[in-house]
Amino acid sequence: MQIDILIVEDDERLRQNMIELINDWAIGDYVIRVNGLSDFTEAEKWLSNNSCDLVVLDLFKNTEPVDEQAGLGVLQKIKTIGFVPVVFFTGYAYKIQDLKSQVVSVVSKNDGIESLKDEIERVVNSRLALLVKLLVNHVRTQMRAYFWDIVNERKADWPDSDKGLSLSYLATRRLASSLSKTDIKAILDDDQIDPTKVHPMEFYIYPPEESDHVQGEIIKRKADGALFAILTPTCDMVRRGDSDPKTDFVVLLRVVPFESHPTFVKKIEDLKVLLAKEEKSNTELSTQRNIVDYLERVIANRQNARFFFLPGTQFLENSVVDLEDKLAIGFDELDTDFDRIAQLDDPFAQSLTTQTANYFLRIGFPDLDASFVLANMGLSSAA
């Protein structure tokens, strides 16, 4: 697959050198193709009418009229027309360190073109440089198959041409459902994605996409940074127009870092000690296996119904929702006293709700005398 890179550099000699070293460069199965521009204003116009997969951008315009921040204008233009990762290659890298993020890189010219190539390779391997192209290709493939292979072949199912809106809705829903884990793995060509396992990122929508608060939303208290999950049903928190929500109060469940919750601290510390030992006795090996098995069951939400495990991501460390640690607050406090972090995606939000309901509605009864039953069956070894 071809990766198109736009290089914006007003130093003619340097630009040509960059093009010679980067054009036709192969990164795995990808081949780099380079367009080079010397004028920052022309680059903005070019980006409005053309597409590329990555932009390598100078910051300082040395030609008259001199502009120390010409590259920032191009970056702002990119932000208004779509997504493409940007790599600044500049002699003034120290001036724009605050721009560095997952999608904007900064490489100093003092580190040479090889350092620039290293950063380009990193971005390509992260799939960010290809994400838009891969998704566009996926949409085209799905729409072709849906409309020509299904809709067009099943004419009898669509006798009324005036119902185009419902057909468009179904096509959009079909496209959304096509973005399953298996499809994402194929789109990104990422061997690290295991379709049989749940990736931590699947748990969350980040940041929350709803304007109203939703059940399963993770929020942070401004006063002390404490985290909570909203338990109140979404329908009770919806504000329709100027009307107030159905509820005056919201129930929260505390979210606690996994490794610092009192229930798990001792086992985790014991496991760390055992793992640090080069030689272990059979008893220690057995203890280690038992602790690992216990923690794996907790993480899989199969050990203790009191806890709902939340896998760690960039915005949340490995944590547990403690179903016994509840808090009720006024609805208005959600907006004044808390920040929205993320929301649990389906089916994990429903799973948390179901687990909470089952935990508090469970019915206990005395243990049956199993020994008595076995004895009556003649299966007891008791004298």
Image (cartoon, helix red, strand yellow):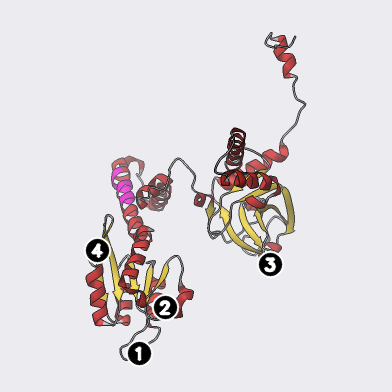
Indicate which disc, 1 or 2, sits on the residue closer to the N terminus: 1
Q: CA separation, marks 4 and 2?
A: 25 Å
Name the residue tied to disc 3. Answer: 336
The reply to whether dot 1 and dot 2 touch (C-beta < 8 Å) is: no
Kindly identify the residue that appears in the image at 54 percent across and 60 percent down: 207
Residue 186: image x %, image y %?
A: 35, 48
Q: Amino acid at mark 2?
A: Ala
Kindly identify the residue that appears in the image at 72 percent across and 38 percent down: 361
Task: Report the mark closest to the observer, 4 or 3.
Answer: 4
Name the residue tied to disc 1. Answer: 66
Name the residue tied to disc 2. Answer: 93
Instruction: Work out whether residue 205 or residue 269 is closer to the camera in this orientation and state it.
Output: 269
Q: Quadrant of the C terminus?
A: top right
- Label 4, residues with CA under 10 Å away: few <14, some 14-19, many ≥20: some
Secondary structure under tag 3 reads helix
Q: Amino acid at mark 3?
A: Thr
Q: In the image, which disc is placed on residue 25?
A: 4
Task: Report the mark closest to the observer, 1 or 2.
Answer: 2
